[in-house]
Structure formats: structure tokens, C-alpha cells
Image: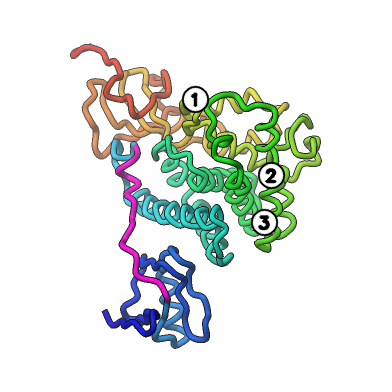
């Protein structure tokens, strides 16, 4: 590596700069211009931009950090499935987005300097990848570890679901990008709520609940300080308002709630339900959808809930189901006309033998088969099956 230390300044030739490199301090190029913040991975487009403008050297007061690529596939249930090329590509993008999100949320929580461009770039990447690959991204969030309910993971998942809902609404590109920002940043105020309250296992006392309810206003203030538009900040402020007017912080009735807040509220509730919480285990996607349906008209706008159903289905994309012939399948495609009879891929036959590559079946066509129930993929090996020859 063509790098040398000059008075604690590390200078690195652009030819030695590689995608994914991270440094313990901000990286600058000519004239003191910031390339990336501390801990943020170098992207290929960053290197391409420097090449294009004729920059040959970058510098930092930090050190090169060891490669830290957490293997998402190793800590989820996706290893149970046959991963197609497009899903594998999206899984890599998701893994990178998750690492970036965790770094950014760590900087926010510690109130350390943060280049808003890195935040914007991450949100933009969430929007673009979800817009181009909605099915794969939804399948991924249903396959990752449901105990990973840290703020950054929840924010990323909420943004993915919100963008999928926005696509079903046929929102314009700038509206989808604002929605992605709203959903990704809506809970950043929770980073400053005391951990003993955030992670309490029992019921919150009135005083503790009052503290939690300040997080919407905290998020609003932080977004304005970061320079986000007032529309995005107002949507963040409204994300805990209810359709029946009994929400907080302003008890705004349904028609007056910001449209992006209505979508974010449903996406946020769904993600919260499918993740473990200190006080309960996670819901399967099917059960989470049913619970949200029960809140329609009171907590949630009925039209917004329809967007969730259209985007992920009653049996959400990625859900593992037991079919009437005792084979196990994963939901891979759903439609407004076939939410109860989606397209699935058979991953295990009725004897529990793995099928790879999986066999696709459209339940809307195969009337002889139906879904008996959704199952937790972690419990597949415990699922009862008929005896041989049945």
C-alpha cells in the first residue's frame, strides 16, 4: 500500500483506496473537502468521483479499520432457502445498508459530528433498492433475525416496508424519497430516551410513558437541526397520531395527519410486531397483519392498511407456510386478488426432504392445495408430518 504517515496524517493514493474501506477518523480530499465520516465505508462511486475530478490522494488523521462485514445470512433463517441470484445480490446490498445504518445511528446517539450527505446517501440507497426490488427486500426482512430489534435495524426495515406501501400508492419519486426519509428517521428521538425506560420489560409507569412520548418532538427537532424539509419533520412528528384522534403528541384527527406519517405508522407497527420486544416474543408476519387489521379505523387509516396488504399480502412475502399436503413452502408472490392463495415455492416435501431448487406453485391455480397455517422457520424441524406412505 502506497501510504505514509506525516505528523499523524495518513495519506493514501487513490489507486490503493478500495470499496468497503473504513477509517477511524473522517477522510478528506484536496482542499479539506470531506469524503466520508469516521466509520463510513468507502463506496465505489466515491472512488469514481475522485477519479473523474482528478484527485489522486486522500488523507485522514485516523487509521484503517479492520474489515467488518457482518454475515447477515449466518444469523437468519435464509440459509433454509434456495437463494436466487437476484435475492443474493439484494442480500449483499441489504447487509451494506444495515452496517451503514448502525454506524449512522451510533454517531447520532453519541451526538458526534455527522455529514448529512452520508445519511441522505443511505436513505437514497434504501429507496432505490426497494423501488427496484420490492419483492426481494420484503423477503429479506422476513428472513433476518427477528431478535435484531435495535434502532438502526428497525429503521431500515420500516423504511423498506414504507417504500413498498408508497409504490402501491403510485407515489411520485420525490414523494417516495421523502417517505423513505420519514420512515428511516422517525424514531431517532428514541435514541435519547433513557435505556432503562426503552428496554423495560414490564408496563411503563405514567411518568415513564410521558418520557417516551417526548420522542416524536425530539425527532422533529433533530431533523430540523439536520436540515431536513419541514414536511418530513412534520410527518415524523405525527407518526404516533391515531386515526381516531387519540394519539400523541397533538391528538390530531385522521384527515389532518400528514400522509407520510399515516404510512410510517403502519409500517412501524408492523416491524415492531415481527420483532422480539423485552416484554414479548415476535409475531409471525401473518399474525402481525391480523393484529394491524384489528386496529383499522381506530389506530390506523383503513386506506393505508390496504396499502400494506397490497404490498406484502396477508401472508407476507417470505412467510413460511405449511400446505394441505404437508409440504413446506415460502410465499414468493402475492396480489390483491390472491392474498389468501399466493404463489409459493416448495422448499420441503411432505417427508421433510429439502427441495433445491424449489418447485414453484401458484395456489390461485392449484385449487387442490391450500395454506393450513404460517409457521416459524426456526421450528421447521419440529413440524409434525404424516407417516411414510401417507
Region of the chain picked out in magenta, as a range: 61-76
Q: Of marks 2 and 1, which one's residue comes earlier in the chain?
A: 2
Furthest-front residue in this view: 7
Question: Crowding near pointer 3: few (<14 within 10 Å), some, many (20+)?
Answer: many
Mark 3, secondary structure of its residue: helix
Tell me the tag on residue 223. 3
Mark 2, secondary structure of its residue: helix
Alpha-carbon span between mark 2 and mark 1: 24 Å
Toward which corner of the image does residue 77 lie, by quadrant? top left
Q: Do the residues labelled 2 and 1 touch (CB within 8 Å)?
A: no
Per the image, is 70 magenta? yes
Q: Residue at (74%, 57%) from the top-left corner?
A: 230
Report the quarter where the N terminus lies. Answer: bottom left
Please state the horizontal and vertical placement of residue 210, each as a whole percent of the image. 70, 34
The residue singled out by tag 2 in the image is: 216
Question: Crowding near pointer 2: few (<14 within 10 Å), some, many (20+)?
Answer: many
Tell me the tag on residue 313. none
Q: Residue at (37%, 79%) from the top-left corner?
A: 10
Q: Residue at (61%, 56%) from the top-left corner?
A: 177
Mark 1, secondary structure of its residue: loop
Relative horizontal placement of residue 183, taking residue 221 as reference (left or right): left
Please state the horizontal and vertical placement of residue 167, each as a whole percent of the image. 59, 48
Q: Residue at (74%, 50%) from the top-left corner?
A: 234
Amino acid at each position: 500500500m502506497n501510504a505514509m504517515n506525516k505528523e499523524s496524517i495518513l495519506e493514501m493514493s487513490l489507486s490503493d483506496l478500495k470499496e468497503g474501506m473504513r477509517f477511524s477518523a473522517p477522510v478528506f480530499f484536496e482542499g479539506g473537502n470531506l469524503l466520508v465520516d469516521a466509520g463510513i465505508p468507502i463506496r465505489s462511486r466515491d472512488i469514481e468521483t475522485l477519479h473523474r475530478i482528478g484527485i489522486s490522494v486522500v488523507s485522514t488523521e485516523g487509521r484503517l479499520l479492520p474489515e467488518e462485514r457482518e454475515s447477515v445470512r449466518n444469523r437468519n433463517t435464509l440459509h433454509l432457502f434456495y437463494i436466487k441470484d437476484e435475492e443474493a445480490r439484494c442480500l449483499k446490498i441489504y447487509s451494506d445498508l444495515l452496517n451503514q445504518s448502525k454506524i449512522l445511528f451510533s454517531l447520532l446517539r453519541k451526538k458526534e459530528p455527522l455529514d448529512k450527505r452520508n445519511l441522505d446517501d443511505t436513505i437514497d440507497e434504501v429507496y432505490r433498492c426497494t423501488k427496484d426490488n420490492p419483492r426481494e427486500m420484503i423477503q429479506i426482512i422476513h428472513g433476518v433475525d427477528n431478535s435484531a430489534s435495535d434502532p438502526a435495524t428497525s429503521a431500515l426495515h420500516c423504511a423498506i416496508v414504507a417504500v413498498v406501501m408508497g409504490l402501491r400508492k403510485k407515489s411520485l419519486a420525490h414523494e417516495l424519497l421523502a417517505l423513505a426519509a420519514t420512515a428511516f428517521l422517525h424514531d431517532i428521538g428514541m435514541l435519547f430516551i433513557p435505556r432503562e425506560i426503552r428496554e423495560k420489560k414490564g408496563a411503563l409507569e405514567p411518568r415513564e410513558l410521558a418520557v417516551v412520548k417526548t420522542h416524536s418532538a425530539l425527532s422533529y427537532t433533530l431533523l430540523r437541526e439536520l436540515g431536513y424539509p419541514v414536511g418530513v419533520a412534520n410527518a415524523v412528528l405525527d407518526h404516533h397520531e391515531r386515526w381516531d384522534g387519540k394519539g400523541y403528541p397533538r391528538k390530531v384527527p385522521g384527515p389532518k395527519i400528514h400522509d407520510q406519517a399515516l404510512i410510517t405508522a403502519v409500517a412501524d407497527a408492523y416491524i415492531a410486531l415481527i420483532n422480539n420486544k423485552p416484554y414479548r416474543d415476535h409475531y409471525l408476519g401473518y399474525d402481525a397483519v391480523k393484529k394491524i387489521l384489528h386496529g383499522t379505523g381506530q389506530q390506523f387509516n383503513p386506506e393505508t392498511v390496504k396499502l400494506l396488504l397490497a404490498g406484502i399480502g396477508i401472508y407476507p412475502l417470505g412467510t413460511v407456510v405449511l400446505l394441505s399436503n404437508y409440504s413446506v413452502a415460502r410465499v414468493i408472490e402475492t396480489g390483491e386478488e390472491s392474498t389468501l392463495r399466493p404463489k409459493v415455492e416448495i422448499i420441503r416435501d411432505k417427508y421433510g426432504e429439502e427441495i433445491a431448487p424449489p418447485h414453484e406453485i401458484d395456489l390461485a391455480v392449484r385449487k387442490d392445495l391450500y395454506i393450513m397455517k404460517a409457521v416459524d422457520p426456526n421450528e421447521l424441524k419440529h413440524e409434525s408430518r404424516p407417516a411414510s406412505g401417507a
